[in-house]
Each structure stands twice: as structure tokens, then as C-alpha cells.
Amino acid sequence: LPEEFNGELHPSDSLEEKVSLSERFGLKLYTGHFDQNTYLEIVKNYLALKGIEFTEALRAEAIRWATSRGGFTGRLAKQFVQHIEAEKADA
């Protein structure tokens, strides 16, 4: 069983409760995938906010980052920029 169900006597009941709350309140979180160009624009904008220039090397690294982690999403764009920021802080 997934870790979130550890200790649950009836994991399916717990899952049904969560789905029920989602349906009742209409809460949905969309973390869809973008095309590569949209993803790169997001990366470029996040980098600009941090004062980091979007170079061709960073472009290639951002593409590798996303493809190795499942696709082009806003979450991955932000995580990539945080990774780059941490690398620069360590340098």
C-alpha cells in the first residue's frame, strides 16, 4: 500500500472520502503538460525573476531536466530554476 494509507484499516474508504471532498467542493489541481516552447518560456521568465540569463546551455539543460522527469510542466520549470539557483549559490 502507498505510504499515505499506512495505518488505515480500510484504505478504500479513505480514498473515497478524499474523492468525495473533491467532488463536493469542486477542488481540482491541474498540473498539465505544456509543449516544449511554452515550458521554455516559463523557465526563461522564472530565470529572469532571479536575475539569471537564459543561455543556450541553460535551454538545453532545461530540456534534459524536463524529459528526464516526465514532461514539460510548470512545476518542473520552477524546480529546474530552483536547482540552477542552488548551483549558483554553491559556486
Image (cartoon, helix red, strand yellow):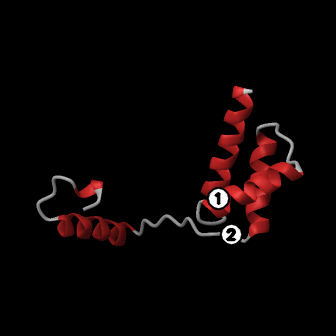
What residue lies at 76% left-to-right and 38% top-to-bottom?
50
The residue tagged with tag 2: helix, strand or loop? loop
- Give the crowd class for mark 1: few <14, some 14-19, many >=20 residues within 10 Å: some
Label 1 belongs to which residue?
74
- Residue type of the residue flagged with mark 1: Gly
Q: Earlier in the sequence, mark 1 or mark 2?
A: 2
What residue lies at 85% left-to-right and 50% top-to-bottom?
57
| Residue 38 position within the rendered picture, expressed as x and y whole percent measured from the top left | 76, 65
What residue lies at 68% left-to-right and 54% top-to-bottom?
77
Establish if 59 lies above or below 14.
above
| Residue 40 position within the rendered picture, expressed as x and y whole percent measured from the top left | 78, 59
- Residue type of the residue flagged with mark 2: Phe
66 displayed left or right of 37: left
Mark 1 and 2 residues: CB-CB less than 8 Å, in contact?
yes
Q: Which mark is residue 34?
A: 2
The residue tagged with tag 1: helix, strand or loop? helix
Where does the N terminus fall, quadrant-wise?
Answer: bottom left
Q: State which quadrant residue 53 falls in.
A: top right
Taking depth in this image into account, of 17 and 58 the one nearest to the observer is: 58
